[in-house]
Amino acid sequence: MPRAIRPAAVITSLTAPVLSLLPALATANPHNDGTTINWFVGHFPPVHFAPSETTPDTANLQGFGDRNLTYLSDHLTGFNHAFYRGTSYRRSEALIRTSDLACNPTMLKTPEREQYIAFSDPIYVVLPNMLAYRPGDDWKFTPHLTDGKIDMHSLVQDRQRRGSVTLGRSYGKAVDEALQSVGTVPHIAQLRHSQLAINLLDVGRIDYVIAFPSEISHFRSLNKQRPDGIRYFPIKGMNELIKGHVGCTKNPNGLKVIEAVNKIIRDTNPYPLFKSYYLEWLEPEAARHYEALSSQGAALN
């Protein structure tokens, strides 16, 4: 389960990123050519924690993406580094697209993004959004299983099964299209925050939640009276694992950073370490599923 981790000393916390302030706030390294990587990092526990949005329970925590970034920045000795915490992914993309050199350490690569973002080789692999349910409730989902995976188009039509999703969130094509096919319906609650949905699942008010397993583990850890571990079904049409990359401005400066990141990956093989960071945020059921996929070769290489 999640543990308190000593915050990395190199990270500068800002609640309102302003590009003109970057050089003065960069972590200087005398052994480089003065190039500064402006890292824009979101708030999406337990991948990243923004200091401006932490609580007493999370103030001393670092997400697995934060720890990955600390490792990379420590090894990117040819650059200065400035860290901007709490930047949304949408804002990060805009800055990467328009800045001289901006990067995000945990990006998903898509054909659209590749038009204006340079991506590193994969640096980590995680479980995708899955259907989470309480132990003993397997039978509720039997009619909607195909080869052990949930058919979301079938499930969303079942008015006997109450679920929840987060407003404005994209879950991937398989889930998004199923939700769009039914629109707003009373048996699928649309809440402002996934933590609310996970709390409702814990107390039996709903039957399932769609979310990342690491996300569910984090928010359940905040509930001191939580019951036994949650169970998961993979979702039909979703990738078994998701690969994350460093994404930088697609210009000579950004390509220079990406080349350096790829060299670190080749020379130091951080995958086992990054995997261990991620496993700390998974409950046993999800961890077993992740390890099984990894052992079958559905991983980075």
Image: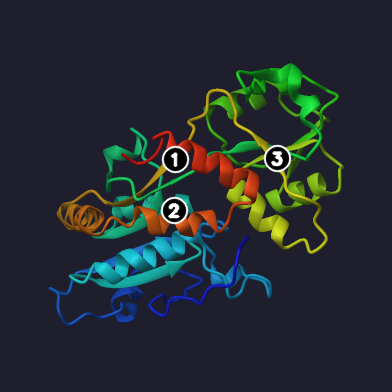
Q: Earlier in the sequence, mark 2 or mark 3?
A: 3
| Residue 72 visible somewhere in the drawing | yes
Q: Quadrant of residue 274?
A: bottom left
Three-letter amino acid code of the residue under disc 3: Arg
Residue 183 percent location from the top left of the image? 71, 25
Q: Position of residue 251 (x, y in %)?
A: 18, 51
Q: Are marks 2 and 3 in contact (CB under 8 Å)?
A: no
Q: 289 or 43: which is nearer to us?
A: 289
Q: Which residue is mark 1?
A: 294
Answer with left or right where residue 44 lies relative to residue 202. left
Q: Residue at x 77, y 35 (%)?
A: 163
User: Which numbered disc flags the more N-terminal residue, 1 or 3?
Assistant: 3
- Decide: few, some or many residues near mark 3? Use Cα within 10 Å; few <14, some 14-19, many ≥20: many
Badge 1 element: helix
**Can you name the residue that lies furthest to the left here?**
33
Quadrant in the rendering for residue 102: bottom left
Is tag 1's residue or tag 2's residue first in the polypeptide sequence? 2
In the picture provided, is 21 more to the left or to the right than 150? Answer: left
- Give the distance between the C-alpha atoms of the residues marked 2 and 3, in whole angstroms: 21 Å
Decide: marks 1, 2 in contact (CB < 8 A)?
Answer: yes
Which residue was labeled with disc 3?
Answer: 231
Residue 215 locus on image (x, y percent): 61, 51
What residue is shown with label 2?
Answer: 275
Q: Amino acid at mark 2?
A: Lys
Nearest the camera: 57 or 86? 57
Label 1, label 2: how many angstroms apart (C-alpha)? 10 Å
